[in-house]
Image (tube, helix red, strand yellow):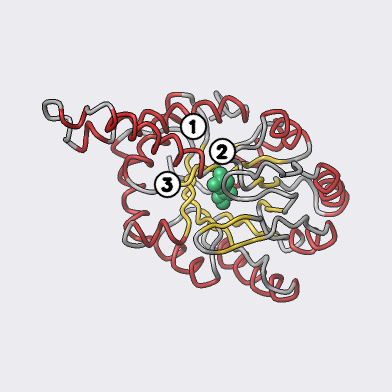
Amino acid sequence: MLVNAKEMLDKARAGKYAVGQFNINNLEWTKAVLLTAQELNSPVILGVSEGAGKYMTGFETVSAMVAAMDKSLGITVPVALHLDHGTYEGCYKCIKAGFTSIMFDGSHFPIEENIAKTTELVNVAHGLGLSIEAEVGAIGGEEDGVIGKGECADPQECKQIAELGVDFLAAGIGNIHGVYPDNWEGLSFETLDAINKTLVESVGEVPLVLHGGTGIPDDQITKAISLGVAKINVNTECQLVFAEATRGYVEAGKDKQGKGFDPRKLLNPGFEAIKAKVKEKMELFGSVGKA
Ligand code: 13P
Protein backbone atom coordinates (compact mmCIF):
# COMPACT_ATOMS: atom_id res chain seq x y z
CA MET A 1 0.00 0.00 0.00
CA LEU A 2 1.70 3.19 -1.17
CA VAL A 3 1.67 5.93 1.47
CA ASN A 4 3.85 8.84 2.48
CA ALA A 5 6.41 8.13 5.18
CA LYS A 6 5.22 10.47 7.92
CA GLU A 7 2.92 8.21 9.91
CA MET A 8 5.18 5.14 9.75
CA LEU A 9 8.15 7.17 11.00
CA ASP A 10 6.23 8.97 13.75
CA LYS A 11 5.08 5.54 14.95
CA ALA A 12 8.62 4.17 14.75
CA ARG A 13 10.02 7.07 16.72
CA ALA A 14 7.35 6.68 19.41
CA GLY A 15 7.78 2.89 19.47
CA LYS A 16 11.61 3.04 19.57
CA TYR A 17 12.32 1.12 16.40
CA ALA A 18 13.42 2.19 12.91
CA VAL A 19 12.00 1.70 9.43
CA GLY A 20 14.54 0.66 6.79
CA GLN A 21 15.00 2.60 3.59
CA PHE A 22 16.35 0.20 1.01
CA ASN A 23 17.56 1.76 -2.22
CA ILE A 24 16.30 0.11 -5.39
CA ASN A 25 18.10 -0.31 -8.71
CA ASN A 26 15.83 -2.46 -10.86
CA LEU A 27 12.84 -4.79 -10.88
CA GLU A 28 14.56 -7.58 -8.91
CA TRP A 29 15.55 -5.17 -6.14
CA THR A 30 12.08 -3.71 -5.87
CA LYS A 31 10.37 -7.09 -5.83
CA ALA A 32 12.79 -8.45 -3.21
CA VAL A 33 12.24 -5.53 -0.84
CA LEU A 34 8.45 -5.45 -1.26
CA LEU A 35 8.02 -9.20 -0.77
CA THR A 36 10.23 -9.24 2.32
CA ALA A 37 8.34 -6.34 3.90
CA GLN A 38 5.06 -8.12 3.26
CA GLU A 39 6.33 -11.46 4.63
CA LEU A 40 7.59 -9.76 7.80
CA ASN A 41 4.59 -7.44 8.14
CA SER A 42 6.95 -4.46 8.24
CA PRO A 43 6.59 -0.92 6.92
CA VAL A 44 9.28 -0.07 4.37
CA ILE A 45 10.71 2.80 2.36
CA LEU A 46 11.98 2.31 -1.19
CA GLY A 47 14.81 4.79 -1.77
CA VAL A 48 15.63 6.04 -5.27
CA SER A 49 18.74 8.14 -5.84
CA GLU A 50 18.86 10.50 -8.81
CA GLY A 51 21.44 8.21 -10.44
CA ALA A 52 19.31 5.09 -9.96
CA GLY A 53 16.28 6.98 -11.27
CA LYS A 54 18.20 7.90 -14.41
CA TYR A 55 19.43 4.31 -14.79
CA MET A 56 15.83 3.07 -14.69
CA THR A 57 15.02 5.56 -17.50
CA GLY A 58 13.49 8.21 -15.23
CA PHE A 59 11.35 8.75 -12.15
CA GLU A 60 8.13 8.18 -14.08
CA THR A 61 9.23 4.65 -14.99
CA VAL A 62 10.14 3.98 -11.35
CA SER A 63 6.89 5.36 -10.03
CA ALA A 64 4.79 3.37 -12.52
CA MET A 65 6.72 0.16 -11.80
CA VAL A 66 6.44 0.50 -8.04
CA ALA A 67 2.73 1.37 -8.12
CA ALA A 68 1.94 -1.55 -10.43
CA MET A 69 4.10 -4.00 -8.49
CA ASP A 70 2.61 -2.93 -5.17
CA LYS A 71 -0.81 -3.72 -6.62
CA SER A 72 0.01 -6.92 -8.49
CA LEU A 73 1.86 -8.43 -5.52
CA GLY A 74 -1.03 -7.51 -3.23
CA ILE A 75 1.22 -5.56 -0.84
CA THR A 76 -0.79 -4.42 2.18
CA VAL A 77 2.04 -3.13 4.42
CA PRO A 78 2.81 0.62 4.23
CA VAL A 79 5.34 1.39 1.48
CA ALA A 80 6.77 4.84 0.78
CA LEU A 81 8.45 5.66 -2.53
CA HIS A 82 11.10 8.18 -1.56
CA LEU A 83 13.62 10.29 -3.46
CA ASP A 84 17.07 9.90 -1.87
CA HIS A 85 19.38 12.95 -1.71
CA GLY A 86 17.25 14.95 -4.11
CA THR A 87 18.35 18.13 -5.81
CA TYR A 88 15.87 21.01 -5.96
CA GLU A 89 14.97 20.09 -9.58
CA GLY A 90 14.88 16.36 -8.77
CA CYS A 91 12.33 16.97 -6.01
CA TYR A 92 9.95 18.61 -8.46
CA LYS A 93 10.42 15.77 -10.96
CA CYS A 94 9.54 13.17 -8.33
CA ILE A 95 6.54 15.12 -7.10
CA LYS A 96 5.28 15.19 -10.69
CA ALA A 97 6.07 11.51 -11.23
CA GLY A 98 3.93 10.40 -8.28
CA PHE A 99 6.49 9.65 -5.55
CA THR A 100 4.96 9.66 -2.07
CA SER A 101 7.98 11.16 -0.32
CA ILE A 102 11.03 13.27 -1.15
CA MET A 103 14.35 14.17 0.39
CA PHE A 104 15.78 17.56 -0.36
CA ASP A 105 19.51 17.50 0.30
CA GLY A 106 20.51 21.11 0.72
CA SER A 107 23.34 20.25 3.10
CA HIS A 108 26.00 21.53 0.70
CA PHE A 109 24.35 24.98 0.49
CA PRO A 110 24.97 27.74 3.05
CA ILE A 111 22.35 27.31 5.80
CA GLU A 112 20.30 30.34 4.59
CA GLU A 113 19.92 28.81 1.13
CA ASN A 114 19.16 25.38 2.58
CA ILE A 115 16.42 27.04 4.67
CA ALA A 116 14.94 28.97 1.72
CA LYS A 117 14.76 25.96 -0.60
CA THR A 118 13.60 23.57 2.13
CA THR A 119 10.82 25.99 3.14
CA GLU A 120 9.49 26.11 -0.40
CA LEU A 121 9.66 22.34 -0.87
CA VAL A 122 8.01 21.61 2.50
CA ASN A 123 5.04 23.73 1.45
CA VAL A 124 4.75 22.14 -1.97
CA ALA A 125 5.20 18.57 -0.68
CA HIS A 126 2.72 18.98 2.18
CA GLY A 127 0.21 20.67 -0.10
CA LEU A 128 0.20 17.50 -2.20
CA GLY A 129 0.29 15.01 0.66
CA LEU A 130 3.94 13.96 0.35
CA SER A 131 6.35 13.66 3.24
CA ILE A 132 9.71 15.42 3.13
CA GLU A 133 13.16 14.78 4.58
CA ALA A 134 15.84 17.46 4.81
CA GLU A 135 19.53 17.24 5.62
CA VAL A 136 21.97 19.14 7.77
CA GLY A 137 25.69 18.31 7.88
CA ALA A 138 26.84 16.40 4.81
CA ILE A 139 26.97 12.62 5.01
CA GLY A 140 30.47 11.46 4.11
CA GLY A 141 31.60 9.11 1.36
CA GLU A 142 30.63 9.07 -2.27
CA GLU A 143 27.14 8.61 -3.65
CA ASP A 144 26.38 9.17 -7.32
CA GLY A 145 29.48 11.29 -7.67
CA VAL A 146 28.65 13.56 -4.72
CA ILE A 147 31.43 13.39 -2.16
CA GLY A 148 30.77 14.35 1.44
CA LYS A 149 33.21 14.48 4.32
CA GLY A 150 31.15 12.93 7.13
CA GLU A 151 30.50 16.11 9.09
CA CYS A 152 28.74 16.32 12.40
CA ALA A 153 25.69 18.54 12.12
CA ASP A 154 25.23 21.62 14.29
CA PRO A 155 22.22 21.12 16.64
CA GLN A 156 21.14 24.75 16.21
CA GLU A 157 21.09 24.37 12.41
CA CYS A 158 19.09 21.16 12.84
CA LYS A 159 16.59 23.14 14.90
CA GLN A 160 16.38 25.84 12.22
CA ILE A 161 15.62 23.25 9.52
CA ALA A 162 13.29 21.14 11.67
CA GLU A 163 11.25 24.25 12.51
CA LEU A 164 10.33 24.52 8.84
CA GLY A 165 8.06 21.51 9.31
CA VAL A 166 10.16 18.76 7.70
CA ASP A 167 8.75 15.34 8.58
CA PHE A 168 12.11 13.70 9.30
CA LEU A 169 15.65 14.97 9.43
CA ALA A 170 18.98 13.54 8.29
CA ALA A 171 21.74 14.93 10.48
CA GLY A 172 25.38 14.01 9.95
CA ILE A 173 26.86 12.24 12.98
CA GLY A 174 30.09 10.96 11.43
CA ASN A 175 28.26 8.46 9.18
CA ILE A 176 29.36 7.92 5.60
CA HIS A 177 27.98 6.19 2.51
CA GLY A 178 29.57 2.97 1.34
CA VAL A 179 31.88 0.66 3.26
CA TYR A 180 33.44 2.25 6.37
CA PRO A 181 37.23 2.55 6.31
CA ASP A 182 39.18 0.61 8.96
CA ASN A 183 40.08 3.82 10.75
CA TRP A 184 36.46 5.04 11.04
CA GLU A 185 35.84 6.38 14.51
CA GLY A 186 32.20 5.28 14.75
CA LEU A 187 29.05 7.34 15.13
CA SER A 188 29.21 10.47 17.27
CA PHE A 189 26.55 9.75 19.91
CA GLU A 190 27.46 12.99 21.62
CA THR A 191 26.31 14.86 18.49
CA LEU A 192 23.20 12.69 18.09
CA ASP A 193 22.23 13.19 21.72
CA ALA A 194 22.72 16.98 21.48
CA ILE A 195 20.65 17.18 18.26
CA ASN A 196 17.88 15.03 19.71
CA LYS A 197 17.70 17.02 22.96
CA THR A 198 17.70 20.35 21.11
CA LEU A 199 14.84 19.19 18.87
CA VAL A 200 12.76 17.66 21.66
CA GLU A 201 13.00 20.92 23.61
CA SER A 202 12.07 23.10 20.62
CA VAL A 203 10.11 21.37 17.82
CA GLY A 204 9.33 17.99 19.38
CA GLU A 205 10.09 14.36 18.60
CA VAL A 206 11.27 14.65 15.00
CA PRO A 207 12.21 11.22 13.58
CA LEU A 208 15.94 11.31 12.80
CA VAL A 209 17.45 9.60 9.77
CA LEU A 210 20.68 7.61 9.75
CA HIS A 211 22.23 7.45 6.30
CA GLY A 212 25.12 5.14 5.43
CA GLY A 213 23.56 2.13 7.17
CA THR A 214 25.98 -0.29 5.50
CA GLY A 215 28.50 -1.72 7.93
CA ILE A 216 27.45 0.15 11.08
CA PRO A 217 27.90 -2.34 13.94
CA ASP A 218 24.64 -3.66 15.43
CA ASP A 219 25.24 -2.14 18.88
CA GLN A 220 25.68 1.33 17.34
CA ILE A 221 22.44 0.89 15.37
CA THR A 222 20.55 -0.03 18.55
CA LYS A 223 22.01 2.92 20.44
CA ALA A 224 21.18 5.32 17.60
CA ILE A 225 17.55 4.13 17.66
CA SER A 226 17.41 4.75 21.42
CA LEU A 227 18.47 8.37 20.72
CA GLY A 228 15.72 9.17 18.20
CA VAL A 229 16.79 7.57 14.92
CA ALA A 230 13.65 6.17 13.26
CA LYS A 231 14.78 5.68 9.64
CA ILE A 232 17.93 3.89 8.54
CA ASN A 233 19.15 3.91 4.93
CA VAL A 234 20.83 0.84 3.47
CA ASN A 235 22.14 0.65 -0.07
CA THR A 236 25.69 -0.70 -0.52
CA GLU A 237 25.11 -3.80 1.61
CA CYS A 238 22.36 -5.06 -0.71
CA GLN A 239 24.61 -4.39 -3.71
CA LEU A 240 27.45 -6.35 -2.13
CA VAL A 241 25.36 -9.44 -1.35
CA PHE A 242 23.73 -9.30 -4.78
CA ALA A 243 27.16 -9.23 -6.48
CA GLU A 244 28.53 -11.98 -4.26
CA ALA A 245 25.60 -14.33 -4.88
CA THR A 246 25.69 -13.69 -8.63
CA ARG A 247 29.45 -14.32 -8.72
CA GLY A 248 28.97 -17.59 -6.81
CA TYR A 249 26.42 -18.77 -9.39
CA VAL A 250 28.63 -17.91 -12.36
CA GLU A 251 31.84 -19.22 -10.81
CA ALA A 252 30.11 -22.52 -10.09
CA GLY A 253 29.38 -22.71 -13.84
CA LYS A 254 25.62 -22.82 -13.23
CA ASP A 255 24.90 -20.45 -16.09
CA LYS A 256 26.31 -23.13 -18.39
CA GLN A 257 24.17 -25.94 -17.07
CA GLY A 258 20.89 -26.50 -18.91
CA LYS A 259 19.07 -23.19 -19.20
CA GLY A 260 21.04 -21.65 -16.34
CA PHE A 261 21.73 -18.61 -18.51
CA ASP A 262 18.03 -17.65 -18.32
CA PRO A 263 18.03 -14.25 -16.55
CA ARG A 264 15.26 -15.48 -14.27
CA LYS A 265 17.68 -18.15 -13.02
CA LEU A 266 20.87 -16.11 -13.27
CA LEU A 267 19.50 -13.25 -11.18
CA ASN A 268 17.69 -15.43 -8.67
CA PRO A 269 20.58 -15.99 -6.20
CA GLY A 270 21.11 -12.21 -6.03
CA PHE A 271 17.39 -11.67 -5.54
CA GLU A 272 17.33 -14.18 -2.66
CA ALA A 273 20.44 -12.58 -1.16
CA ILE A 274 18.75 -9.17 -1.10
CA LYS A 275 15.69 -10.70 0.55
CA ALA A 276 17.86 -12.26 3.27
CA LYS A 277 19.74 -8.99 3.85
CA VAL A 278 16.54 -6.93 4.07
CA LYS A 279 15.10 -9.47 6.55
CA GLU A 280 18.26 -9.28 8.69
CA LYS A 281 18.05 -5.47 8.75
CA MET A 282 14.33 -5.34 9.51
CA GLU A 283 14.89 -7.68 12.46
CA LEU A 284 17.78 -5.54 13.71
CA PHE A 285 15.84 -2.29 13.27
CA GLY A 286 12.81 -3.74 15.11
CA SER A 287 10.25 -3.02 12.38
CA VAL A 288 9.03 -6.65 12.00
CA GLY A 289 5.32 -6.93 12.80
CA LYS A 290 4.91 -3.13 12.97
CA ALA A 291 2.90 -2.66 9.75
P1 13P B 1 24.97 2.91 2.29
O1 13P B 1 25.17 2.70 0.82
O2 13P B 1 26.25 3.17 3.01
O3 13P B 1 24.20 1.80 2.91
O4 13P B 1 24.13 4.24 2.46
C1 13P B 1 22.83 4.32 1.95
C2 13P B 1 22.27 5.67 2.10
O5 13P B 1 22.50 6.36 3.07
C3 13P B 1 21.38 6.16 1.05
O6 13P B 1 21.05 7.50 1.25
Give the label on residue 278, or none.
1
Q: Residues within 10 Å of mark 2 (few under 14, many from 20)?
A: many
Q: Position of residue 78 (x, y in %)?
A: 49, 38
Using a 10 Å C-alpha cutoff, classify the residue at mark 3 as few (fewer than 14 neighbours), some (14 to 19) or many (20 or more).
Answer: many
In the image, taking residue 9 as reference, residue 235 lies left or right, namely left
Q: For this rendering, which residue is in front, 287 or 251?
A: 251
3D distance between C-alphas at marks 2 and 1: 8 Å
Q: Is mark 3 within 8 Å of ligand 1?
A: no
Asked whether the beta carbons under mark 2 and mark 1 sit within 8 Å of each other, the answer is yes
Mark 3 residue element: loop
Q: Which kind of residue does numbered mark 3 sit on?
A: Ile
Q: Residues within 10 Å of mark 1 (few under 14, many from 20)?
A: many
Badges 3 and 1: C-beta atoms under 8 Å apart?
A: no
Residue type, numbered disc 1 = Val
Per the image, the residue denoted by label 2 is 20
**Residue 290 spot, x, y in % from top left:** 57, 28
Upstream in sequence: badge 2 or badge 1: 2
Report the residue at 51% width, 44% height from top.
235
The residue under label 3 is: 24
Describe the element under mark 2 as helix, strand or loop. Answer: strand
